[in-house]
Amino acid sequence: MCKLLEPGVRKISAAAAKLIRSEVRNEAAARRERLLSLGATDDIVKGLVRLFELDGIFGLAALAARKKLDELALARAYTTLGEALGIDWAQQQIARFMPPTSGSAC
């Protein structure tokens, strides 16, 4: 599985800064500040925030590998579709109102 997904994950991850919308960057920054204020270490916070920023990356890499599609083209299409349908906005609004699970810092 790692061998199949790694190239796509690396490719999308490297281009993530250009793919991530400002709303996601703002939410990531807010989560970063919240975790730091709760006493999480910088290393832990970096990893958790990166996971948030790369939400869906494994599914995109798997789909691209299975269908032999360009990972970045697929990621751009996914981002554009989410933006056009308001799915990205809806996901962010839901995430804001979801209470943290017990023992969770975010």
Image (cartoon, helix red, strand yellow):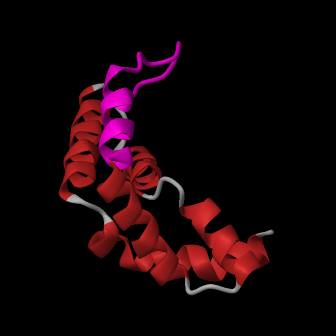
Q: Position of residue 103 (x, y in %)?
A: 52, 16
Q: Give above or below for 19 relative to 97.
A: below
- Magenta residues, start to end: 86-106
Residue in the image at 38% along x and 30% along y:
95
Q: Residue furthest front?
A: 85
Q: Where does the image place residue 38, in percent across and percent down from the top left?
A: 30, 25
Q: Is residue 92 left or right of residue 44?
A: left
Residue 81 versus residue 6: which sits nearer the camera?
81
Residue 99 location, quadrant? top left
Left or right: 61 as drawn, with respect to 4: left
Q: Nearer the viewer, residue 47 or 72?
A: 72
In this rendering, does residue 11 appear at all? no
Quarter holding the C terminus? top left
Left or right? Give the position of 32 relative to 91: left
Q: Position of residue 48 (x, y in %)?
A: 44, 46
Q: Residue at x 31, y 27 (%)?
A: 96
Report which quarter residue 21 is drawn in: bottom left
Count of marks overlaid on the render: 0
Q: Say which residue appears at 57% left-offset and 73% top-offset.
A: 9
Question: What quarter of the picture does the N terminus occupy?
Answer: bottom right
Q: Is residue 8 magenta?
A: no
Residue beneath the point at 30% across and 31% down: 93
Residue in the foreground of this view, choosing between 75 and 106 = 75
Residue 86 visible in the current orientation: yes
Question: Residue farthest to the top?
Answer: 102
- Left or right: 36 with respect to 77? left
Task: State the image coordinates of residue 89 (x, y, percent, origin top left).
Answer: 29, 43
